[in-house]
Amino acid sequence: MNFIHRLSSAFKAFGRAYAGARLTPSQADYWNGGGTPNSEIRASRDRTAARVRQLVRDMPWLDQSFDDSVAYKVGEGFNVKPAVVDGQGKMLLGENRRIKDAFLWWCEKAEVNGRDHFGDIQRMAVRQMLECGEAFIVYRYLKGEYRLQVYEPDCIDSSVSADDIDQGIRFDRDTNAFKGYFFRSLESSPLAAAAEAKEIPAEIVIHLYRALRPWQRRGISPLVQVSLLAADLDQYLSNEISAQQMTSRYLAFIQRAEGDDGSDHQGDDYIDNLTIRYLGAGESVQFAPGANRPVTGLESFQDTFLRILSTILKVPFHVITGKYTALNYNTLREIRNNAVHILKPEWAYLTRHLLQPVYDHWLDWAVASGELSLKGYWSPAGKRHWRKCFFMPPGIESVDVLRDIKGVLAGRDAGIIDPQDWIMGQGEDPDEVISGLSEFIAKLKAAGLDQQTGLAPGEDTKLGQAPSEL
């Protein structure tokens, strides 16, 4: 009997394979038999995007969390530093300055509407990736000018379908390389949408999305993981507020004595906004337990949700909640270092798929239109030579600037740290910082002030000391 029992247990374990695949009664309706990434996104993308947008509109702190995430990822927009070098590997400072000035001038009105800055486009693209899971930007050449046009993901006509077209994207069936996108106007009626869809070559479309599985063609909002939980929290908050409002409306309940028909007093009494209600003989009022319970359960639920949201949006929990209690330098430093470590892949993705492609197309247009004259640009190796540049993310402010600078200088003296890397990590261009310092020192000299103290010769040096040192 023992042998049969052991054999039966072994077969049951073999059939289950993994504990994570075992179904419980509560998961019967949830279970998904699995499918391709495109079939799953095709069935859920539009509804998920609409739900996330609704939650962002209805929940101010969720909207603010999105703003925090966008600020951490792009800030006011990446800074650019052209890095063209000569044959000996030295920076061509004059050429780099000329290229950067021209690019910054173009950035002022990079969108076809003639209003939005390139930094605004970056922020909009990241916001779209959070709400909808993807963003679309098209290169446009209007009246000889190079511009960008931002489209909502809803502008892709997902109804267009064929053997080599999926969710409004034409692709190569062997390599999955994208060949074209079918765009339509959001104002199109459902009947006219298919007729009005226009295919745009993939070469002039920037499609930003987070690919989680091979051959995935569209993106889906990262909030898909918590959208239902957020809706539950929103309902929870509404219910708690309604319950507390109901209990706060009444000042007192007066129960009539036996035989009192209430003829001497009709209706309720009011003191300011509070109600005094008269009850009939034998009547009583008892509020539901939810109206009297403390809100510790609500706070715990909200705290758990915000921690999950912090992980998904890659924003420190303290930033999302605004709680800066029980923190010290070491904790703040660790939070900052972790944030930078987590954001590095995000910055790299934006650089490779948005910033560098836009810059390359702009440089092609600038040289072709005569905006810039770059020797040998159209030669076989010319583009590779002239397109070299760095894109510096916004960076995260130092917890203690003095400590960090001392560490950088000590590393410089030891020959293990390049101060330029630290400056670029703050989102600044080292050449501009050095130029600004030189200009500042020249102003001090012109004013006859000491370069170290900023004081005039003979002026009391105690004025530059801290109060504790006087």
Image: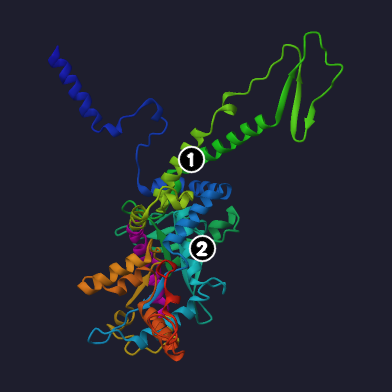
**Secondary structure of residue under mark 1:** helix
Dot 2 amino acid type: Tyr
Q: Is residue 6 visible?
A: yes
Q: Which residue occupies 19% across, 24% down?
A: 11
* Label 2 packing within 10 angstroms: few (<14), some (14-19), many (20+): some
Quarter occupied by the N terminus = top left
Q: Is residue 43 visible?
A: no
Q: Is residue 9 magenta?
A: no
Residue tagged by mark 2? 151
Q: Which residue occupies 75% across, 35% down?
A: 273
Residue tagged by mark 1? 302
58 to the left or right of 376:
right
Quarter occupied by the C terminus = bottom left
Q: Is residue 468 above or below residue 104?
A: above
Q: Which residue occupies 23% across, 32% down?
A: 17
Of residue 408 and residue 287, the one placed in the foreground of this image is 408
Q: Position of residue 157 (x, y in %)?
A: 50, 57
Of residue 276 and residue 341, the one placed in the foreground of this image is 276
Q: Position of residue 346 (x, y in %)?
A: 37, 60
Quick one: which residue is furthest to the right in this view?
264
Q: Which residue occupies 75% across, 26% down?
A: 276
Q: Is residue 17 above or below residue 63?
A: above
Q: Is residue 390 above or below residue 243?
A: below
Numbered disc in front, either 1 or 2:
1
Corner quadrant of residue 292: top right
Q: Position of residue 110 (x, y in %)?
A: 50, 74
Q: Is residue 359 magenta?
A: yes
Q: Position of residue 434 (x, y in %)?
A: 37, 81
Q: Main secondary structure of the magenta part?
A: helix
Q: Earlier in the sequence, mark 1 or mark 2?
A: 2
Dot 1 amino acid type: Gln
